[in-house]
Image: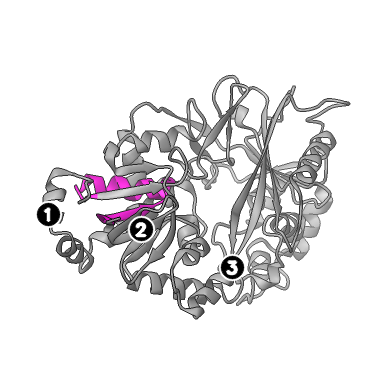
């Protein structure tokens, strides 16, 4: 069977793959996007359960770059509402002590004795040049705030020793304000102050609206690439088809991309094996209510299985008056946990907090395992990641998205990552190789076509 030929092939139509596809379509570049599922969205999807839109994870739109704001203005069939980001940290296992986020800026809400201890010792022992994430976080927050919140919370998320994570794992951490120990920090702008969310349909309303911007022939659903041959520039699909490409863009998790490379060098495979991650059980439930007046609550106490609860009824579609979403991290060797165990921890935690009372059970519930939940760095990750990305780029393969780039990203940044991949495809000398290899490239660009020959 003769291989189909496309100047650009995109693997995966999550939000980053959609961002890349939209950018190429705007330039009239012929491409085809292959998505193994029956619809676009990746992990930014929602399932209707008993009439309620349960998101695959608690996704909202924060930190909006200008190009994403412009894109949202072009989307049809979806409306976004703006909500206050009422986010808090629960100290202990009850709802008696909740400190608004960022925790480091609201320390005045702690008991007087706790604040006095923080004021006396908060800046002692800070490392000027932290050697790991634990030292970085303690330096940003101060040792007292670090022990009260950050340490417990971050241990529950990655399920990995914080001392083995490099200090630059994340930069999304506020520095403790000494003033906040004594008085409110009124007017303090911070990342979680306001966010956007679709007015109806759950988070999937976003990728579905993005997909409607694509020429119909450019997106192929139910199509999974199972092998990539960089030397011949051929991707082989699960159904036996072969697709020849000039440039390849992948939003698949980086280890999955390497696993599909035929005859990948041993050092690249070893580098892929070095990439660490933690899986997450996302548990969505409808409960009798009432719910706490928060959008998101974080839980550093190890006695509660979940590290975070979100309350879509505070910002989701009408009809989800009592929706709650819990996240519980796990890993097959570092922290093994079955779906049944996760559901049990979820119920027990809701009862401790008083969200479920007496013999109450959730009215509706779904448990979804997100295999790649949190991408992790240990001290060798950056070198392994760089080796893989350099190898792929040298073979005309561009990566985008949180898992494709193996870098922490919010949804807007993932969309931008896809747009950047499109720009890389169009940059010299890649653009000439596309047009030269598939002689109709310039014609396709003028016509906005996605055809093959």
Question: Relative to 202, is 290 on the left or the right?
Answer: right
Q: Residue furthest right?
A: 358
Q: Which residues are magenta?
A: 3-30
How far separated are the C-alphas under marks 2 and 1? Answer: 20 Å
* 246, above or below 365, in the image: below
Residue 378 visible, this orientation: yes
Mark 2 highlights which residue?
A: 249
Residue 65 visible, this orientation: no
Q: Nearer the viewer, mark 2 or mark 3?
A: 2
Mark 3 highlights which residue?
A: 377
Do the residues bearing badges 1 and 3 touch, measured as CB atoms within 8 Å?
no
Query: Which residue appears at 36% of the width and 53% of the height?
Result: 241
Quarter of the view holding residue 87: top right
How far separated are the C-alphas under marks 2 and 3? Answer: 23 Å
Q: Which label's residue is closer to the chain start, 1 or 3? A: 3
- Is-magenta flag for residue 276? no
- Is-magenta flag for residue 17? yes
Query: Which residue appears at 19% of the width and 66% of the height?
Result: 433
Q: Which mark is residue 374?
A: none
Which of the image's four quarters has the N terminus? bottom left
* 256, above or below 348, in the image: below
Neighbourhood count class around disc 1 (C-alpha, 10 Å): few under 14, some 14–19, many 20 upward: some
In the foreground, 139 or 9: 9
Neighbourhood count class around disc 3 (C-alpha, 10 Å): few under 14, some 14–19, many 20 upward: many
């Amino acid at each position: 069977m003769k291989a189909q030929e496309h100047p650009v092939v995109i693997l995966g139509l999550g939000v980053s793959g959609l961002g890349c596809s939209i950018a190429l379509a705007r330039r009239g570049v012929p491409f085809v996007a292959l998505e193994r599922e029956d619809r676009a969205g990746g992990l930014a999807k929602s399932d209707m359960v008993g009439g309620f839109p349960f998101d695959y994870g608690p996704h909202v739109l924060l930190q909006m770059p200008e190009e994403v704001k412009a894109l949202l203005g072009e989307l049809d069939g979806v409306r976004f509402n703006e909500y206050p980001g009422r986010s808090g940290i629960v100290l202990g296992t009850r709802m008696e002590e909740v400190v608004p986020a960022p925790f480091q800026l609201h320390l005045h809400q702690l008991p007087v004795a706790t604040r006095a201890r923080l004021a006396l010792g908060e800046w002692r022992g800070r490392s000027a040049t932290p050697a790991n994430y634990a030292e970085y976080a303690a330096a940003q927050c101060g040792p007292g705030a670090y022990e009260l919140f950050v340490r417990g919370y971050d241990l529950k998320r990655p399920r990995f020793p914080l001392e083995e994570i490099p200090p630059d794992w994340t930069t999304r951490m506020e520095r403790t304000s000494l003033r906040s120990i004594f008085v409110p920090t009124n007017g303090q702008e911070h990342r979680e102050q306001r966010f956007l969310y679709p007015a109806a349909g759950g988070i999937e309303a976003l990728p579905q609206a993005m997909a409607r911007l694509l020429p119909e022939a450019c997106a192929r659903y139910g199509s999974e690439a199972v092998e990539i041959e960089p030397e011949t520039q051929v991707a082989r699909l699960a159904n036996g088809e072969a697709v020849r490409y000039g440039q390849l863009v992948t939003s698949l998790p980086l280890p999955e991309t390497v696993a599909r490379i035929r005859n990948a060098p041993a050092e690249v495979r070893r580098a892929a094996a070095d990439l660490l991650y933690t899986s997450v059980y996302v548990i969505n439930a409808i409960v009798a209510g009432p719910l706490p007046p928060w959008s998101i609550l974080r839980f550093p106490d190890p006695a509660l299985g979940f590290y975070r609860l979100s309350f879509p009824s505070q910002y989701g579609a009408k009809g989800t008056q009592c929706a709650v979403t819990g996240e519980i991290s796990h890993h097959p060797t570092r922290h093994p946990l079955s779906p049944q165990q996760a559901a049990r921890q979820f119920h027990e935690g809701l009862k401790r907090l008083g969200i479920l009372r007496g013999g109450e059970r959730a009215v509706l519930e779904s448990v979804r395992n997100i295999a790649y939940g949190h991408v992790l760095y240990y001290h060798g990750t950056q070198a392994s990641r760089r080796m893989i990305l350099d190898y792929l780029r040298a073979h005309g393969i561009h990566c985008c998205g949180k898992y494709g780039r193996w870098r922490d990203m919010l949804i807007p940044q993932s969309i931008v990552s896809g747009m950047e991949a499109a720009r890389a495809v169009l940059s010299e000398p890649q653009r000439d190789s596309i047009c030269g290899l598939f002689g109709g490239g310039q014609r396709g660009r003028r016509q906005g076509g996605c055809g093959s020959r």
